[in-house]
Image: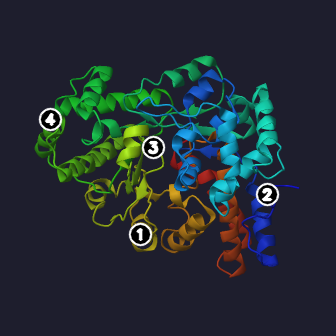
Amino acid sequence: MALLDDNRLFAPDPGLRTLARALYDTVRDLPIISPHGHTDPQWYAENAPFPDPARLFVTPDHYVFRMLHSQGIALEALGVPRADGGETEQDPRKIWRLFASNYHLFRGTPSRIWVDHALQEVFGITERLTAASADAIYDQINDCLKQDAFRPRALFERFNIEAISTTESAIDDLKWHRMIRDSGWTGKVVTAYRPDAVVDPEFPGFAANVEKMGEMAAEDATTWQGYLAAHRNRRAYFMEFGATSSDHGHPTARTEDLPQDVAAALFDKALRGACTDDEADAFRGHMLTEMARMSLDDGLVLQIHPGAARNHSDAIMARFGRDKGYDIPTRTDYVHALRPLLNAVGERPDLTIILFTLDETSYARELAPLAGVYPALKLGPPWWFHDSYEGMMRFREMATETAGFYNTVGFNDDTRAFCSIPARHDVARRVDCAFLANLIATGRLAEDEAFEVATDLAYRLAKQAYRL
């Protein structure tokens, strides 16, 4: 018995289901464009076997371990490494058994679809994961992982990934990307420029990070002009390894367009660690405008990921470090926050700014109207907590009426979990086809147009927006 219903996520109405299915059949096997994500470039560089099922599905995936932790399971028991060097569970079979015995916690969640998809489509498993089936499923996955066909590059090709972007810090040396390039492998793995560590005065080690960036760029980055020159240098270096985008994860969507002397004075305060919270936010906001102007020169797409209160738990941050499932969405203002940036560069059709949100209340009220008029602005797909059937459908329903389809950029999976990539794209393709079927059935879109839009949403828009 299959784990997955072949008509999942399509409407129960027979007519709508038939339409959605016909649309989906034309896009289900299109190549995957994955223009933004967090898979590890070391995987593709070394092409070493994945070590075991636990470290493939559980330990690195915050979608998985945050749900388990919400039910009182210690992160140590799931093998999540501790920043303070403390002990954690090292037996992958024990971790897998713990995951399997609590798999019921994922009922109705997108994680359940993603994991079931990987189990069935990647590893040929058709038995539901439970405490009773845990060992047999572990053994089947483990046996697969020993085969060359399940190494990262082979899976990359099997998943039909045409291009994938990882995301690296501005002060990363990109050694894994260099190794990929030098290996002669033809898989397209590019990087993306993530400068948070050197544009956020509240980022740990900000001043030291800026100095390091200056050393890497052969610029005196402790001066304002040298700092900007170092960014330009590093962006150019990232572009040597295929970068087509920069990525900015800020607490708010605030932008500023400050006079240069004011920005320079604020930068000096940031280096001294003397910024107030508001000044730090203002500096981050000004740097978005500076990065947009750099994009006009070098062509990098500017991605803004605002609105996450990151590392909400002080105790977890101290014990495990960043990115351990404690990033929480916040209310976000876009109309006023983006105005300085959009007044500066928003009318430029040769610039692409892709905006993401964790605040769904802003879709119809703010984001769709903004993207529906400013030539530079496009809407990214539902992100993070909204990467789900419901989240994707809400996005289409609230954004399409004002922004249309062509002020959006298709889908990106934004994942660290390699085996979930085809599952996530499959969900997005099914949801979009279900949405288009409803437009056909209600007389709002001709059937031949819907087939064209389905391909645009699944493939063309992401490739075009990210210049891949």
Q: Between marks 2 and 1, how big is the CA–CA gap?
A: 33 Å
Do the residues under discs 2 and 1 have CB atoms within 8 angstroms? no
> Which of the two discs, 3 and 1, sits closer to the camera?
3
Q: Which residue lies furthest to the bottom in this view?
A: 442
Residue ID at (69%, 32%): 52
Q: Nearer the viewer, mark 3 or mark 2?
A: 3
The quadrant of the rendering that contains the N terminus is: bottom right
Residue ID for mark 1: 362
- What residue appears at the point 52 percent right and 50 percent down from the top-left corner? 465
Mark pair 4, 1: CA separation? 36 Å
Looking at the image, the residue that sits furthest to the right is 1
Image location (x, y in percent) of residue 139: 80, 35
Q: Could you tell which of marks 4 and 1 lies nearer the N-terminus?
A: 4
Q: Mark 4 points at which residue?
A: 272
Judging from the image, what secondary structure is the residue with disc 2 in? loop
Q: Distance between the residues labelled 4 and 2?
A: 56 Å
Q: Earlier in the sequence, mark 2 or mark 1?
A: 2
Q: CB atoms at circles 4 and 1 under 8 Å apart? A: no
Residue 106 image position (x, y, % from top left) = 65, 58
Which residue type carries mark 3? Asp
Residue 381 placement, left or right of 422: left
| In the depicted structure, whether residue 465 falls above or below residue 110 | above
Which image quadrant is residue 252 in?
bottom left
Label drawn at residue 323: 3
